Structure formats: C-alpha cells, structure tokens
Amino acid sequence: MDLYKALKISGTSLNTQRTVMNIISTNVANAQTTRTEEGGPYRRKIAVLGPAEAPADFSRIFAGRMEMGLEGVEVKEIVADLSDLVAQYDPQHPDADERGYVTLPNVNILEEMVQLMSAARNYEASVTAFNSAKNMILKALEIGR
Amino acid sequence: MNPIYGLNPTGDRRSSMEPVGRREEAAGFKESLAQTVREIDGLQKEANQAIETMAAGEPKDVHEVMIAMEKAGISLRLMVQVRNKIITAYEEIMRLQV
C-alpha cells in the first residue's frame, strides 16, 4: 500500500478547489461582460468534478489492487451554464440591440459568493484531512517505542 | 516480461499477480532498505525542486510545495526510525555472551 496515497488524494482535492476558485473568480470578474470572442455576452462557467483516474500501469495494478478506485478528484471539464441570459433596458449601451435591450451574463453574484464559501470550506476540510493522515503516519512510526 | 502485463490492463489480473509475488519474495531486506533510501532521496529532491520553482516566481501552488515538504519530512522520520531499529537490533546481538 502506498504510504502517501492519502496525502496525494488530499492534494488532488486542494488542486481541484483552487481551480474551482479560479472559475468563480472569473465568473465574478466577468459579471458585466457583454462582448466576448464568440460574439454574445459572457456565459457563466461551471466546473464538472469527477473522480481522478490513475494510469493503469503495472506497478499501480500490483500495489493498489484493492484501492484502484480511490484516486481523488479532478476537474473533468468546464462547461458554460446554458440558463437564460439577463436582458436589461439600456439604449445608451454600445451593445444594445435595436429594441434597446442589452443581454447581460447570467452570473448571480450572491450565488457565486455561496459557491466561493463552499470552495473555501472544502479546501480547509481537505487540509484537515491531510493533517490527520499525516498524524496517523507519524503515530505509526511510534510503534515499538 | 513485466511491461507486457502492464500493456494489457483488461487482461487476466490473476495471472499478472503471480510472477510479481515470486519476485517480491526474492527481494531481500537490503534491497528494500536501499529502495527506501532512494525514495527518500527522491522526495527530498522533489521538495527542493518545488521550493525553487516557487521562489523563482513560476506558477506553483503553495499547497503543492507544502505537500512535497511534508512527504519529504515524513520519509526522513521513517528513515530515522528504521536506523534506530537497526542499531537496537545490532546492540542486542553484540550483547550476547559468547
């Protein structure tokens, strides 16, 4: 059994939560972006998380026969939120259409704040899990003392 | 022969486990000890590398550096314990009256 497997799994969780935080920051920063490269306004991005897959090489199969399903988490893909965009009446805006409406991104700041707190708590929980796993390992070193 | 088993993960796992079992018995204590020392050295180098990349300003997450340092620290303590056990065993043997 790999001694550092638990530490590595917590490490993947920390990486993933950092990526989620970056996505949330991008959403918040682009909450008013009406002009993107694809033409329309910015669409809110969502991270899709899934279990990380280990490379199935020989040493992994041998060492981790029972633990092959446990590899941690990773961001599988970043998709755009397909919910409705917000239309706001503002004829002075340079991106207003012929009726005077501007389509704004579907970013709800309050919801992003909640996601942000959730990501931060997940990060802290992963750090706690990492410390607990490390303490277990160090305790094991005290066997026979 | 071993890489051939590795290339076919969907093959018969049972048959791929046996030859490794025999190989594991053959590896002696000295070999596993040398292996441990190599791994610890590798982890120390990895921790150094992580600290250097972060000091140079390259985008490396703080938690990755911390994890690398913790792993190196744990393996060092493991090495110290192994050394203690070996020395205790040695002294025990030397105490035997001839």
Image: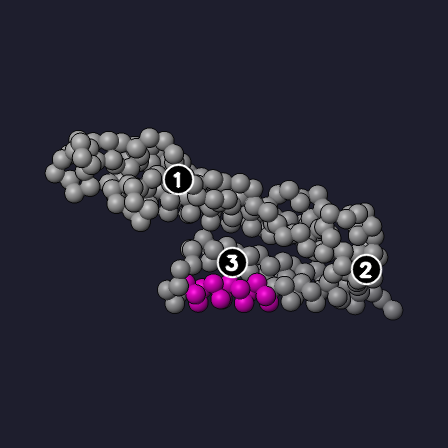
**Foreground tag (3 vs 2):** 2
- The alpha-carbon separation of the residues under discs 3 and 1 comes to 34 Å
Residue at 39% from the left image edge and 63% from the top image edge: B58
Q: Are marks 3 and 1 on the same chain?
A: no
Amino acid identity at mark 1: Ala
SS category of the residue bearing label 3 = helix
| Tag 1 subunit | A
Residue at the spot of label 1? A80
Hey, what amino acid is under mark 3? Ala
Res. B13 mark: none
Position of the N terminus of chain B, as image quadrant, is bottom right
Q: Judge from the rendering whether residue B46 lies leftward or rightward of residue A142; answer left or right.
A: left
Chain assignment, label 3: B
Give the residue pinned by disc 2: B23
**What is the spatial separation of the Cα atoms under label 3 and label 2, in whole angstroms?**
30 Å
The residue at the point 29 percent across, 45 percent down is: A39
Q: Residue at x 53, y 64 (%)?
A: B46
Residue at the location (76% across, 59% down)?
Answer: B4
Q: In terms of sequence position, does the residue under pointer 3 or pointer 2 come before the other?
A: 2
Residue B71 image offset from top left, x and y in percent? 55, 57
Query: Is A16 displayed left or right of B42 in the figure?
Result: left
Q: Is residue A1 left or right of residue B27?
A: left
